[in-house]
């Protein structure tokens, strides 16, 4: 599924800007049409610029996805907006994920805890996100960051299961290393892939599906070779190490920019990885020894 951009990007200058409602809809429609996209993130973009008050941008974005897409969407829990968006989904008979998020280190805000209660009340599947920064809000060591992720995610799982035994859950990993020269997340860096692989193996042992959320954003500000390899490496390594969902599509630079052209290119990556995971069949016909 897609990784968000705060806005779109000008393909001539590569300068970011706020998307219009039409551009927001265009990205939703492209994601809806791509064969390897199975659901949509809470943010194709962080709202749009057509006179929408800031407080309504996220809710208006959810409404656009419900009207313009045939695919499942995610109910972000920021500022308790999911108490409205989940009711919107139920009224329109749209499938939706609850989305409680942790806050590193070891913090849980009220709106995110409330998301667990809403998931239980409406019997929704939950995609629980963890997004620490190694060297900032998490240990700088990769193993230590995996331990912190587990410690932050497990309480939400326990709470959801106490509220609704047998509830469907998955865990999403958006742990990024910190660039020590400027404090920014090091999108696409090899440590991202190493953390994903270890995280996936641990949670596979637990029997809980994992979501790789860090394979979408890169440190490139344009569609170029750097962007390609910084997406491909964590995506394929996450796939072969057991991740059930890959948050790959449409993002360009961090959480700053996204574009439908990039989403189309990402679908090629997803298709190749899917074919690789299928492997090769070995039988009399495929051996071709006649």
Image: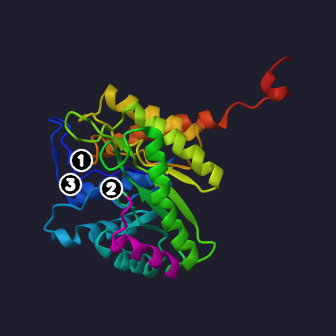
Disc on res. 19: 3
Residue extending furthest toward the top = 289
Q: In the image, residue 139 lies at what x, y percent?
A: 38, 44
Circle on res. 256: 1
* Residue 266: percent from left, percent from top: 42, 39
Viewer-side residue, 182 vs 51: 182
| Mark pair 2, 3: CA separation | 10 Å
Q: Residue at x 47, y 72 (%)?
A: 94
In percent of the image, x 40 and y 51: which residue is there?
2
Along the horizontal axis of the image, is 103 left or right of 201?
left
Mark 2 or 3 closer to N-term? 3
Residue 268 visible here: no
Q: Secondary structure at mark 1?
A: loop
Q: Which residues are magenta?
A: 106-121
**Among numbered discs 1 and 3, the one appearing first in the sequence:** 3
Residue 262: % across, % down:
34, 40
Q: What's the CA distance linking mark 1 and mark 2? A: 11 Å
Numbered mark located on residue 209 in the image: none
> In the rendered image of this protein, does residue 286 appear above or below residue 127?
above
Q: CA distance from mark 1 to mark 3?
A: 11 Å
Q: Is residue 80 visible?
A: yes
Label 3 secondary element: loop
Give the residue number, with chain letter if any, for mark 2.
44
User: Is residue 61 on the magenta stretch?
Assistant: no
């Amino acid at each position: 599924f897609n990784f968000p951009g705060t806005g779109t990007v000008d393909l001539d200058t590569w300068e970011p800007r706020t998307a219009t409602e039409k551009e927001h809809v265009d990205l939703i429609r492209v994601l809806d049409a791509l064969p390897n996209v199975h659901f949509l993130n809470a943010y194709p973009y962080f709202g749009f610029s057509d006179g929408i008050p800031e407080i309504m941008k996220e809710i208006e974005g959810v409404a656009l996805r419900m009207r313009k897409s045939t695919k499942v969407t995610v109910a972000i829990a920021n500022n308790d907006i999911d108490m409205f968006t989940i009711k919107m989904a139920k009224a329109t008979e749209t499938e939706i994920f609850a989305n409680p998020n942790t806050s590193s280190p070891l913090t849980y805000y009220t709106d995110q805890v409330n998301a667990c209660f809403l998931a239980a009340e409406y019997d929704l599947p939950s995609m629980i996100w963890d997004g620490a920064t190694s060297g900032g809000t998490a240990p700088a060591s990769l193993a230590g960051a995996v331990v912190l992720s587990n410690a932050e995610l497990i309480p939400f799982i326990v709470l959801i299961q106490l509220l609704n035994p047998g509830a469907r859950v998955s865990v999403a990993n958006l742990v990024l290393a910190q660039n020590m020269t400027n404090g920014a997340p090091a999108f696409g860096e090899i440590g991202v892939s190493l953390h994903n692989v270890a995280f996936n193996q641990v949670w596979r042992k637990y029997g809980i599906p994992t979501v790789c959320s860090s394979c979408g954003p890169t440190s490139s500000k344009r569609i170029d070779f750097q962007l390609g390899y910084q997406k491909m490496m964590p995506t394929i390594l996450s796939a072969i190490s057991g991740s059930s969902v890959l948050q790959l599509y449409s993002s360009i630079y961090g959480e700053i920019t996204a574009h439908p052209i990039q989403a189309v290119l990402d679908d090629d990556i997803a298709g190749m990885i899917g074919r690789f995971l299928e492997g090769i069949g070995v039988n009399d016909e495929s051996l071709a020894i006649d």
